[in-house]
Image (cartoon, helix red, strand yellow):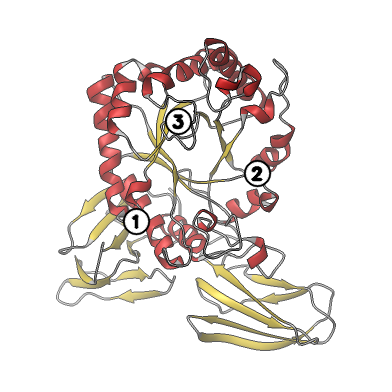
Amino acid sequence: MTTPTAAMAIAMPAGRISYEISRSGKRLKSGVITRSAPLQRLTLSGIPQGHYTFKVRGSDRKLTTTQIAIVDSPNAWITQDARFGVGLHVEADIYDDAARYARALGLSEVRNDIFWERVEKKKGVYDFSDYEEPFTEARLQGLKILGVTGRGNALYGAANASAPRSSAAVRAYGKYNAAVAKRFTLSGIEVFNEFNHPPKNKSGCTSASCYLPLLKTVDSEVSKVKPSLPIVAGATARYPSSWFRELWRKGGLRHANAVSFHPYEITGKPHELGGIVRDARRDMKAAGGATRPVWVTELGTSARTGNRTQAEQASVLVAAAASGFATGMRKFLWYDLINDTPNAGDQEGNFGLYAHPAKSAGAAVAPKKAAFAQALMITQLGGRPYRATEYLGTGVVTKSFGTSSNLVRVMWTPSGSKTAQIKTSKSVVLVGFDGSKRTMKPKNGVVRIPVTSEPVFVRSGAARAGVTR
């Protein structure tokens, strides 16, 4: 929700309804209202930006608890940022309202598989019914759709069930991609998903040499029906430098409009994403003689019990995105939107920005701290482009966005607690990772900012939240 219009809709038995809003165990607001309609509105006026626990108890004494998040925005909505997106699984029932949840955070793009075996069950006949309604809903929410054309199809022989290997299956894969391009309005087609990763590609060959025929046939067939549609090459698990160099040496760059990968190796050190993006550009130039835009189309980390906390998960998101943009990354898509399972101890089930519906007490899924961090980053950056990496203290990472007179700095430290020093004669606004704000005045021409592993935003000059270029 945004501060101008934040409100809760409560459906409870007639009578008195008590509520409480707290953060980190500290109560910010509480009160009692009387239900005057079947759906009672509770305006959250006076609640500042932040991620909160909301408790409500009806006349039947039943207690309901959920997480809520409020962000500053000059409008009733968050202006979308074209750099940010998220992965979906619209095949799952929990994603029925995914487009609304993604749009609520200010995201601009969603990524989803379009599985070949789901679409073509009879040779040459394509049935897109599994994807038509959710993709239409995404478009109606103003979201771009990055389609991933993955896996093989046993229709063309058992050896092609995991990935296309025979010449006939490769040709059919190209035609299927053309049918996808013709049917949907997409921001790009990502050729396969983690082809280099044996768990995702069990065909027996995961090399760039085996991948290249797929890339070529997709480029050839899609160009016949929609020549302007970007073909995205790679989508690899991690960033395998030698794999990409082989692909580029063999001419793969001629068939790609963008390059993607999933750099999960940096989740413990998100500030290193910038170096990987730099490596990707270097490898393209060295082995292919040119470069293409770099899209990080999948990156996430699990907030399962015993792994990372929700705050640590959120920190990875912000630090990785800022670091990637600093070295030329064009797009950053988090994996994924909603927890796959209510089991807090499940590794794969806790990557989401939102909680699983079974853990969400209300009609809408509850935002985790990562969802709040994503919305906070989008509203604080306000569409500003990357400007510079600054040195403001030992061990402090600082990425600045905007202009000298309208500047937003994203600051954190990989470990421990540090102090950043900004030389200025004017006050700055410090926005904490919890959303809190305070104005800091310089002393002797310096503003000192406490910095930890949880990124903060520092606004200076004319910078405001939610202001776009």
Residue drawn at x 53%, y 65% as measured from the top left: 368
- The earlier-in-sequence mark between 1 and 3 is 3
Circle 1/circle 2 CB separation < 8 Å = no
Q: Which residue is mark 2?
A: 90
Q: Helix, strand, or loop for circle 2?
A: loop
Which residue does the numbered mark 1 point to in the structure image?
A: 319
Q: Earlier in the sequence, mark 2 or mark 3?
A: 2
Which residue position is annotated with label 3? 195
Q: Position of residue 287 (x, y in %)?
A: 25, 21
Which SS class for mark 1? helix
Q: Is residue 257 above or below residue 268?
A: above
Three-letter amino acid code at disc 2? Val
**Mark 1, residues whose alpha carbon is within 10 Å: few (<14), some, or many (≥20)?**
many
Amino acid beneath label 3: Phe
Q: Quadrant of residue 426?
A: bottom left
CA gap between label 2 and label 3 equals 21 Å
Above or below, comparing residue 66 to residue 192 in the picture: below
Question: Which element is circle 3 on?
Answer: loop
The N terminus: image quadrant = bottom right
Residue closer to the observer: 403 or 102: 102
Query: Which amino acid is tagged 1?
Result: Ala
Indicate the position of residue 262 as horizontal and vertical percent values. Answer: 40, 41
442 vs 152: above or below = below
Q: Nearer the viewer, residue 404 or 325?
A: 325
Q: Residue drawn 76% across and 87% down?
A: 61
